[in-house]
Image: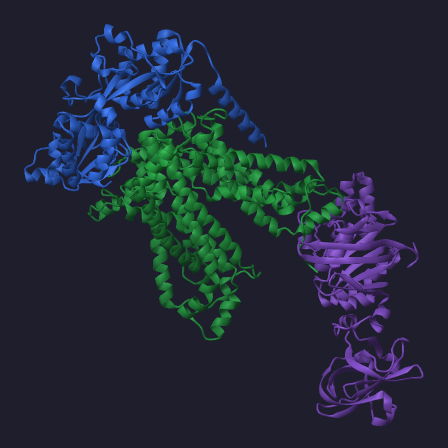
Amino acid sequence: MKRILFAMAAMLVVATAVFAQDAKKVVIYAALDEKTSNELAAAFQAATGYTAEVALQMEQAGTVAGRIKTEAPMARADVVIGGNSNFHADLAAGGYLEKYTSPVVKTAGISPKFMDPDGYWTGWYLGALCILYNEKRYNDEIKPKGIQPPATWDDLLNPAYKGQVIASNPATTGGAYLMVAAQIFRLGSEQAGFDYVRKLNDNVAQYTAGANGSIPLVSQGEAIVGVAWGHDTLKQKAQGNLPIVVVFPKDTGFEIGAASIIKNAPHREAAQKFIDFLLSPEAGKINSANGYRYPVRKGVALPAGVPAFESLALAPWDLKAAAANVDAWKKRWAEITGK
Amino acid sequence: MSTGTRPEGVTREPWLLVTVVVLSALLLAFVLLPLAATVAFPRAGDWAGILSGARYRRAAANSLISMAASTATATLFGFLFAFTAMRTTVPLRRLFRGIALLPLFSPPFMVAFSYVMMFGGNGLITHGLLGVRASIFGWPGLWLSQTISFFPVAALIIESALRAIPPSVENAARNLGASGGRLLRTVLLPLALPGIAGAALLVAIQVLADFGNPIMIGGNFSVLATEAWLRVEGWGDVRGAAVLSVELLVPAVVLFVVQRRWVAAHAVPALGTRASLEDLPPTGRLARAVLFTFCLLVSLLVLLVYAALVMGAFVKGWGFDWTPTLANFRDVVGRGPELLRSLAYAGVAGLLSALLSVCSAWLVSRRQFAVRRAIDLGTILPAALPGISFGIGYAIVFGRPPADLYGTAAIVVLSLLFWNISMGHQSAAAALSQVPASFGEAASNLGASSLRILREIEGPLLGGTLFSAFTVSFIRAITTLSVVVFLATSSNRVATITIMNLVTDGFYGKAAALTAALLACSFLALGAARLAAGRPVELFTPAVRRA
Amino acid sequence: MSETGVSPHVILQGITKSFGDFRALSGVSLEIPRGSFTTFLGPSGCGKTTLLRTIAGFYEPDSGQISINGRRVDGVPSHLRGAVMVFQDYALFPHLSAAENIVYGLKVKGLPRPERERRLKRIADYLSVTDLLSRRPGLLSGGQQQRVALARALVMEPEVLLLDEPLSNLDAKLRETVRAELRRLQQSLGITTIYVTHDQTEALSLSDQLVVMNAGTVVQAGPPRQVYFAPANRFVASFVGTANLLSARVTEVADGHLSCDAGGLSLRARRSSETVEVGCDVVLSVRPEHLSLLPQEGSAPAGERLPGVVISSLFEGPRVRYWIRAQDHELIVDDYRRDQAAPAGAAVFLGYFPEQVHVMEAEPNGGD
């Protein structure tokens, strides 16, 4: 009985902590890993003297977005950070965000192409898709055929990789959608892009539900080659000593990691300060050190093994088209692959 | 005459009335409301979108296919194990039985996870030993994992069905000339059939609701439970997920109703005599050899799960770097909060669930009142609800004002508490049916109030049940993934969620170590609880003894 | 100590009780004398246990009144009626020792410990369970459990003691001993006792008043001898003891005696009722012990003997039970002279006294 009462009391304490409000503070919803979120909050606190509370931290941007929608009538958080710009664009379209353009964009000379043309979200980091392959299996099975290691999207169409490619499913993950969009944008038309999807489909062993599902499968040798987020792959490779090689292909797809102020934010001024802070070199460093992501601000040190951002060749991108065609392109993709 | 005993009402004692009202309110708020919300939440467009999507139609079909296949094999395995343990003289049968019960104590996804490590494209057995590169991902792997995960449940139920058949019946059939297959076909099977069917229905519900195995090993073979999660994870589409979870809910509830009806209609009255093996002649050589081989192979498959887990926990990179390491356990230390939360939430939910369910079972089986049937139904209902559906209901109702518990411990504890309440309720009701009603009547005839009867007479007699209800709830709570997957945030995330994330990210070693730690913690906790629940009643010396 | 049968202690008036569609009691009215031992006897389902439980307060009657000691008790909680019950399965609390079981009710009542212990000691001595007090029910034999259960009830010093088939869980030998003990105990305490049983021997041997029930009604209530020797109808005759029942028509009335024809068998009986006339249809009830095998044909007057043929016989120790065909009837005869044994097929004569042939008016439906 005592234990029950104790536990009840503990629950109350937790609940109170969650509900407690404070004027000089910012409440953050983060679609980022836990470590990055907490370090960002701590650094902001140290830099500004404002309290920063990470009230919600989930790696899945979808869940965070869903959360903001459900509590919209009574917004509890001030900013939502992380997750690619499509989630933010979707929230903006639903009227869940407030416009804000940070003055830091101009003062720091950050490219405006990473900012919302409509002025809602602020891009503060980038992630690019990569190709990864299992080194041993490539050497054992592919190299003897005289085939070079995969370096471009078209290399994945080589019949030698039949049944050996792991990609992900746009129905379940935004990363897969960006991969499809990258093909359409680089090849110049929907038709050419979906033609690529059709050809790739012949080689694909499995479309994973998550964008990074190929990392374990290729590392384990379930398949030879896969597509995933470059930053996540490099990070997992470094942490798990994975036997894979990571390549950023030309014309690769990318996401803009965004941050936005939530409509009716209880602490609007603090929220703006926090967005400004995300564009600082300090925030960029925390983000890239933990998540291997590229800050939009130039001149931030990157972890070892991460190629310089300038070395990447991003596909020509049409943010509007990418946001406008989500349902149509997902549907088309499903028709072609039958998945 | 013995025209049963009819329970009395609740109006004579005010606290009984209060209990009824409170219990009804709790069930309304924490069982019915989330359920209703799940059904009501999606808009027409969400229904149309999901129901017409080829992907989701296939997921629905896959759910049914895997249910049929896994239920068939799990029931068959369960029957063979139960039969071997109860009705044969196969060597090591008791050991086999013990091994068969192991999966009941493990997280449901563990089997799939271990089989990926053992039989995957780079699996220790398939690739390491046999040099084959066959992928276990997809329906074959799912079928195998679900069979191994759920046959213990079938074995337990069928075992009690077989136990109810006195050996004398079998011996009588032998005496009349039936033996071997004929005996099995004409006597044992018909008698055990209700039990077998009941087991199959229960397993079917569990397979249908299974989230852990398909998320780990299903690969392209997607089922409704995992699709519901992916809708939220990938696209933040809670409404779509609610549609999918309703799709899952409907067959689950239908199966549950059928199962309840079936079991009620075919309840075999316990014939008193327990089957003791000494009463049966030795099993034939051929049958013995076949059953022994079968049980041995399946037992090895079960043990393999744990072997993979332990091995995985101690190597650097499963499948490519077999260097032994303790690094994975260093990682576990950093997961302390999740482990603690797992233990604390499951402990609190288990305790409260056991107490509440004994209370409801006592009311329902000992008193007569207006909403008695409704309370009974409301308490039993969660047993039919797939964890995914239950969790999403909580996310919808308690994830926003006015009852916003999102991210709190309370939402997890409450969901686990009410998801498990049927377990305790059913076992307490069963136990109460074993306690003659005359005990309570005798006490009330001697002047004891209902509260006093519950506290002094029927309560102490239910002590064992209370503890087992706690144990079952605790194990279910600490091992569940599906209920909490929609409720977890950084501040209330439990270990199973972390394990799932680690596995999907490919950190098998860390996942294995954390799973091992979770298992160890839960066994330690259970051991401690057993000690704590030791029999204080035994130590009580009656004052009158000195007289 | 009050005298038997002086004033009614428990009065039941028009008790009716239904469970759903099943009518368990229909209009039962009964008076139970102070200090008497009253037995409810009947087949299962007759309502006897329901009636007992209604008196105990486990059921409330749908209609009717219950008074104990002149006080209306229907609607009064069980423990305030002064009627304490001993259950068929004893309902000893398995987790409490015998002593704790016995003092349970006193404790609930809030009696101080010294008083509890005093009463415990007294009742334990009285029922010779002192040595068993520290044991749990699981370690007691059936007879011991029965005594503890009785002690638990009696220690409450109830107005009325209710016993629900308390001997049915004992083996045959023990049952006879306990039955005798129970009767002595009741008589020495003079406590009004209501006892439910389906065992007619038990009912006959224990009761001051025997209440035979069937289908929710009281069929006959009276002293055991009256019920046994003058059953009210076919049902009572066949349920209480063994009886040869013969449907017959009265052929002659003379000298306070009747002559009857039972399917070709001619019997004489005492005329007990003025309403029985020549031509009446009656049922004759003859107990097996009231028939005997005559040593020779002439040892009884012609009207008081019956010819028959032995079908089979069983030696039962003090007597021999015969099945004898007499015309279309098969009669059961208990013969206490064991020196002679008639083999199957033997032609015999049965003797009887007309005074021992009980005449009942035939019931319209043929009555059973």
Residue nearest the observer in this picture, A331 or C78: A331
Residue occupying image coordinates x 33% and y 34%: B231
- Along the horizontal axis of the image, is C324 left or right of C257? left
Quarter holding the C terminus of chain B? top right
Examine the image and state in which quarter residue C177 appears. bottom right
Examine the image and state in which quarter residue C86 appears. bottom right
Q: Colour of chain B?
A: green
Q: Colour of chain A?
A: blue
Residue nearest the observer in this picture, B387 or C360: C360
Relative image position of residue A275 (x, y in whole percent) = 32, 12
Relative image position of residue A243 (x, y in whole percent) = 19, 33
- Along the horizontal axis of the image, is B31 left or right of B124? right
Q: Is residue B310 visible?
A: no
**Image height of C307 relative to B58, above or below:** below
Q: Is residue B414 visible?
A: yes
Q: Colour of chain C?
A: purple
Relative image position of residue B301 (x, y in whole percent) = 33, 50
Examine the image and state in which quarter residue C248 appears. bottom right
